[in-house]
Image (cartoon, rainbow, N blue to C red):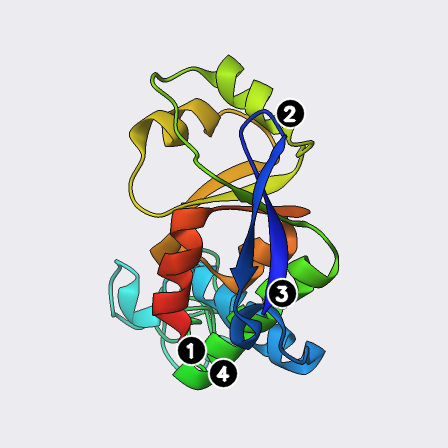
């Protein structure tokens, strides 16, 4: 097991903690990380683009004029795609872009993302992470004390004071343990974990 320094909210080292190699020291494969991040981004696509096809247009179905003898092109009803206001051909319909990769691959990618933060020395562990009131200024003070300007903070469970204090701070995101994901870990420069959340991550990944 590797040892990591445990800091308090003032940025001072108070102890050390051992973290499991099976989660924070695995071989990193960029292809696996890419596959899972692509899956996450695809699942976030709205897929709500839609056009009206010929059958969706309101209008008469009567043939506009006779087939022969006018010298004009053969014409059907007013909903023809060739006419202004007619239906669209091969336009987009609402759809879901989401797809899944195997659960084992998702778990492995999460371990790789955590390992990358540990290897880059961007993993910070706090002895406790609490606020007694909703105060953005206090949260900014904690971030400066631990020298984090662009970071992902993890909480073991819902913490209203912390979540509301940080929601308007740019480049800072609060996630609960169950929402921990590869994309967010790689997106932010630092990963900040309270000791309690490490145990929750172990339960989830082991």
Q: Are marks 2 and 4 in contact (CB under 8 Å)?
A: no
What residue lies at 42% left-to-right and 46% top-to-bottom?
175
Sequence-wise, which precedes: disc 2 or disc 4? 4
What residue lies at 35% left-to-right and 48% top-to-bottom?
156
Sequence-wise, which precedes: disc 3 or disc 1? 3
Percent coordinates x, y for residue 80 in the rendering: 41, 70
What residue lies at 39% left-to-right and 32% top-to-bottom?
163
Q: Nearer the viewer, mark 3 or mark 1?
A: 3
Residue 183 location, quadrant: bottom right
Sequence-wise, which precedes: disc 1 or disc 2? 1
What residue lies at 38% left-to-right and 49% top-to-bottom?
196
Marker disc for residue 99: 1
Label 3: state its secondary structure: strand
Sequence-wise, which precedes: disc 3 or disc 4? 3
State the separation of the CA atoms marked 3 and 4.
Answer: 24 Å
Label 2: state its secondary structure: helix
Which residue in the protein does label 4 denote?
105
Q: Is residue 14 visible?
A: yes
What is the quadrant of the N terminus in the image?
A: bottom right
Which residue in the protein does label 3 denote?
2
What is the quadrant of the C terminus in the image?
A: bottom left
State the separation of the CA atoms marked 2 and 3.
Answer: 24 Å
């Amino acid at each position: 097991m590797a040892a990591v320094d445990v800091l308090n909210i003032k940025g001072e080292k108070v102890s050390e903690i051992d973290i499991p190699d099976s989660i924070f020291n695995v071989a990193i494969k960029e292809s696996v990380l890419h596959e899972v991040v692509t899956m996450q981004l695809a699942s976030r696509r709205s897929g709500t683009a839609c056009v009206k096809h010929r059958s969706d247009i309101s209008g008469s179905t009567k043939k506009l004029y006779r087939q022969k003898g006018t010298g004009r092109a053969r014409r059907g009803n007013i909903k023809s795609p060739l006419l202004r206001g007619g239906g669209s051909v091969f336009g987009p319909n609402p759809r879901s872009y989401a797809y899944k990769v195997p659960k084992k691959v998702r778990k492995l990618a999460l371990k790789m993302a955590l390992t990358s933060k540990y290897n880059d020395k961007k993993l910070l562990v706090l002895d406790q992470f609490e606020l007694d009131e909703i105060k953005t200024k206090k949260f900014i003070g904690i971030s400066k004390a631990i020298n984090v300007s662009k970071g992902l903070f993890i909480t073991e469970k819902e913490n209203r004071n912390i979540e509301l204090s940080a929601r308007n701070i740019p480049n800072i995101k609060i996630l609960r343990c169950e929402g921990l994901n590869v994309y967010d870990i790689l997106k932010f420069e630092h990963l900040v974990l309270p000791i309690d959340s490490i145990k929750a991550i172990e339960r989830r990944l082991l």
